Amino acid sequence: MTAPADRVPTDRYRPTLRPDVLVSDEFLLGARSVHLVKNPRSGKSYEVGVKEHFLMARMDGTRGLDELGAEYAAEYGKRLGDANWQRLLGMLGVRGLLEGGPAAPPAETAETAATADEPPRRTLLRGTLPLVADADATADRLHRAFGFLLAAPFMVPLLLLITVMEVVAVARLGELVDGASALFTNPVLLAGVAALLWFSTALHELAHGVVARRYGGQVAEIGLRWRLPVVIMYCTVDNYLYLRTRWHRIATAVAGAVMNLVVLLPFCAVWLFVPVDDATGEALAGLLLLGSVQALAMLVPFPPLDGYKIAAQLCGATGLAASSREYVRLAVRRDPAAKAYPRRARTAYLGYTAGSLLVFAGIVAAVVALVVHLVAT
């Protein structure tokens, strides 16, 4: 192959990925395996293939292109030509991912400059409102204050207590349903329970941020989001998909539901062990039912719930729902394209589809059983 006139000097140039660039683990996306790459300075994210990631992971400034090419050839049995290097390095440079290059592509910089002074769009019916100036610093302070609870000596007993509470709730489900029914006839107690559940959702969001902070995550925003009549808190973990291991990502996703259930523990203790009047007992029973449903609903594996994020990490996929739908569509039609999916992808997509259908059937069965119970009483 004839080298182009602007050929990179392979014996001297040692490409270095910017130290602040975020690179994810390998994820399934359709029939492909990809890594996600994010330039924090521009906020843009990109997908790269496994082979591109192989080279990027070794661009630490210690290897020239000849050395990188030799390692690539040893791994994949093929050397890269000059045109391949030009495309790869050009792509990384244009996206602002290489040390010594621009922090962001010019188009992105112009776009950012044009919108930097524009406030978030808010209307009476919908919008968001950040509550703190530095969300990451706030999450860090919360982690310093309460992060010790995430250590095994505290977390294991908490999880055991939550498990016992939910077993008791299932065993006495009829009492909880009756309590919830009575609760809806008492506006004062219902308002109190609603306030507690709203407070629980706020702690749910902060729990995501605190656990993410423990594993090196960055919290971009903490604020209020409203879609009237619903007003909730939110906590955005900016680099969730770039946390170091899938278990760190799963822990971050499940933290909210765990916090919802932890909030219920003292109320469950009062309901079980403290003599109270009938109205208070019914309110506590209703709170336990509604709070448990609130927490467990977040673990349903449908987007955009936390359970979906957990399922995606267990499957090692991004865009899991869309990829699963596409694969099942091809498989049902016996399209030859379905055979191009690797076994790992087929297993993940079929497993997610089957699991989702089972969960949906369980939800329908629970709703029907609840309606039958209410009609019978």
Image (cartoon, rainbow, N blue to C red):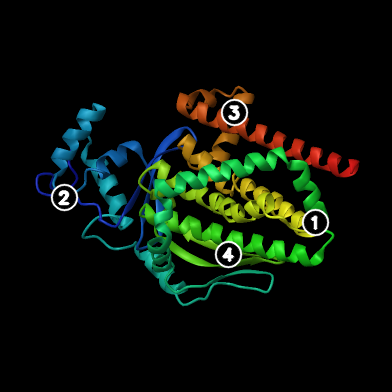
Percent coordinates x, y for residue 358 in the rendering: 66, 32
Disc ID at residue 61: 2
Res 376 label: none
Residue 65 rendering spot, x and y as whole percentages: 16, 43
Q: Mark 3 or mark 1, which has the lower sequence index?
A: 1
Q: Please name which of the two marks, 4 or 3, marks the residue nearer to the observer.
A: 4
Q: Are marks 3 and 1 in contact (CB under 8 Å)?
A: no
The residue lying toward the viewer, choosing from 199 and 34, is 199
Bin the neighbour count of mark 2 within 10 Å (Cα to Cα): few under 14, some 14-19, many 20 and up: few
Q: Which mark is residue 278?
A: 1
Front position in the image: 274 or 170 = 274
| In this view, the mark in front (1 or 4) | 1
Name which residue lies at 54% across and 37% down: 323
Looking at the image, which residue is at 19% across and 48% down? 60
Cα–Cα gap, marks 4 and 3:
40 Å
- Circle 3 Cα neighbour tier, 10 Å, few/some/many (<14 / 14–19 / ≥20): some
User: Which amino acid lies under the numbered mark 2 shown in the image of this protein?
Assistant: Gly
Q: Of callouts 2 and 1, which one flags the residue occurring earlier in the amino acid sequence?
A: 2
What is the number of the mark on residue 330?
3
| Residue 335 in picture, x, y percent from top left | 58, 24
Residue plotted at (38% across, 54% down): 214
160 sits to left or right of 246: right
Amino acid at dot 3: Leu
The residue tagged 4 is 233
Mark 3 to mark 1 CA distance (whole Å): 57 Å
